[in-house]
Image (cartoon, coloured by chain):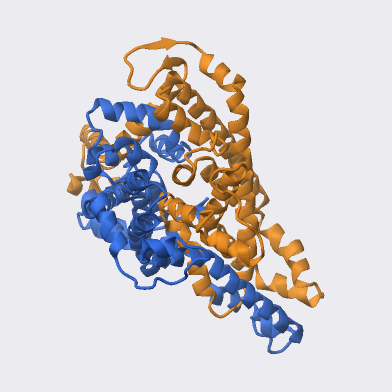
Amino acid sequence: MSTADVLAPPQAAAPPVAPRRRGALQSRRRRSALLWFLLLAGPNIALLLVFVYRPLIESFYLSTLQWNLGSPVARQIGLGNYIELFTSRNFTQVATTTVVFTVATVGGAMLLGLGLAVLLNQKLRGRGFARTVAFAPYVLSGFAVGILWLFIFDPRYGLMREVLSWVGASSPQWYTERPWPLVMVIIVYLWKNLGYVALIYLAGLQSVPQDLKDAAALDGASSFRTLRSIILPLLTPTSFFLLVTMMLASLQSFDIIKAMTQGGPLGSTTTLMYSVYQESFVNGRAGYASAVATVLFLVLLAVTAVQMRFVQRKVHYA
Amino acid sequence: MSVLTPKRPAAATSTPPTAPTRGDVRPTAASSRPGRRQRPHVVSYLTMILATIVIGAPLVWMFLASLKDQSELYQFPVQWLPGSPDLDNYAQAASTVPLGRLLMNSIGLTVVGAGLKVALGLTCAYALVFLQFPFKRFVFGLVIATLMIPPQVTIIPNYTLVADLGWLNTYQGILVPGLASAFGTFLFRQHFLTLPGSILEAAELDGAGHWRKLWRFVVPMSTPTIAAVTLVSVVTEWNDYLWPFLVIDRADKMTLPIGLTLLQNIDGLTNWGVLLAATVVVTLPILVVFLVLQRRLVAGLTAGAVTG
């Protein structure tokens, strides 16, 4: 086959060949392209259809059922699951927890990450090492990290109690007394993702033209002023990218919460994501859980849609 | 992607012409300004050292704690260093859960999973870039759109399917549902679009078919991207939690993070040393990969920021 379609320029082959044969050659070539396409892209696309698109659509359908995981019987109840979700007393708590967790982790990581990036953007000796240390937690297993920090937060023997005692504070009941479990989970999440944010900001900072900074300095601007009026505005696309990706990641986080609090105590660390797991695989209410999952999906979709609009606008400005 | 590795020289060389009035202005911020810049440096150094300690301490603490014995762990004020460091906690962890087996499972699934993911991404991206096909754009859209579909939304139907197939507690049950490559396909496509077309045309004139063109020409020209995608896949496969946690409840099929869950359920919070030893086993291999191949891994993990 390959030898046939190699002599690509049709002009070369065309004159002596009869039109009918040329057509046959063309369709043979097209067939072989189709074959190659199926061979090369087919497996990946088949997997995506079976394990992403099929379950996505099925999930919408499941959300209209009263159905327990593994049960052979299911009852069609329309929007019943959604009505139950939005009217349940639990929902207010889950929504609040999700918002607090997301705002604290995303906002905190971005502020601290920017600070760290500005710090490491200076020519300091050893900043390469600092960058490595800061990024390391990001590549580690969330579950393992959760276990490690649970030990650090141990109210009786933990490192955190020790550190707090240096400033004369006593350790809160991190495991049991609200709101400390949620605070604890947020701190761990920040620790794990801070380095990622810092690194992305660092890349952004390094693309700020040096002459702009020099010009500001010549005009007598303080470094803080330069940061606020020149660097931050130039970093807007980076900030927006981080805002969206961090939000998506934060809304989906599971393993840290699973390791540290299992959503408790009394549901005080149960986010929307965690309640999908809880409802389906702990309580067995798969239909109801699918409704929660659909709501989560719509939230994520909204975040993504905002990002896409913004990215398009950015293209116009640039 | 390579944009992310600090490109000091490039930024610096563009500077001199812009400051013509000051004869020998050098590009570094510190040297281009008079003395008042010196003092903040002390503060900067202190902040950097403090930040490094705060971020790094938990990891150091984990290693130290895994070497301590029970009485050293359960005391306050804390004992900083293990009195007589030994591996007892590791031995005990290994006797409670099959730690060696878990390690092999994790390594095997990570290698096979990452390898297949890269292969699927490479072939799919090749087809999307170098083959002429009517619905190419639509197919590309189909692949990219899955980046926005969180796996968490698909777990219930996928779990039912995997259970129906009899794949609970099997390696394929862990592996197959997460195999499709959207991120890899996307990055490979971005890279393939930048490859010089002339080389592939020359290959074609030499009679190379698609298979040969892919492995002999495209792949060798894509090693940095392949390295980045492979490393990202290795990290995500190794750390993957929710799906294997749902699909596996038999110890001999578990990956390390799931085995750690089992250990937590058995030992609770009464045996920190053992739990932390297992935590070291989960985190150390990836930490080593990270330290050795840091540049490529970071480039891959942060690729989204530059590519969109």
As displayed, is residue A57 above or below residue B223? above
Q: Is residue B71 left or right of residue A291?
A: left
Residue furthest bottom in the image: B23
* Chain B drawn colour: blue
Between A258 and B153, the residue placed more toward the observer is A258
Between A252 and B201, the residue placed more toward the observer is A252
Percent of width and height locating residue B244: 33, 41
Quadrant location of residue A216?
A: bottom right
Report whether residue B196 is seen: no
Percent of width and height locating residue A121: 61, 71
As displayed, is residue B1 above or below residue B140? below
As displayed, is residue B4 above or below residue B178? below
Percent of width and height locating residue A58: 40, 23
Report whether residue B174 is seen: yes
Between A150 and B175, the residue placed more toward the observer is A150
Q: Is residue B19 left or right of residue A3?
A: right
> Who's the residue at 33% across and 48% down the image?
B263
Q: Is residue A275 left or right of residue A210?
A: left
> Who's the residue at 54% across and 48% down the image?
A185
Q: How many marks?
A: 0
> Who's the residue at 36% across and 69% down the image?
B292
* Chain A drawn colour: orange
As displayed, is residue A29 above or below residue A213? above
Between A242 and B185, the residue placed more toward the observer is A242
Percent of width and height locating residue A304: 56, 39
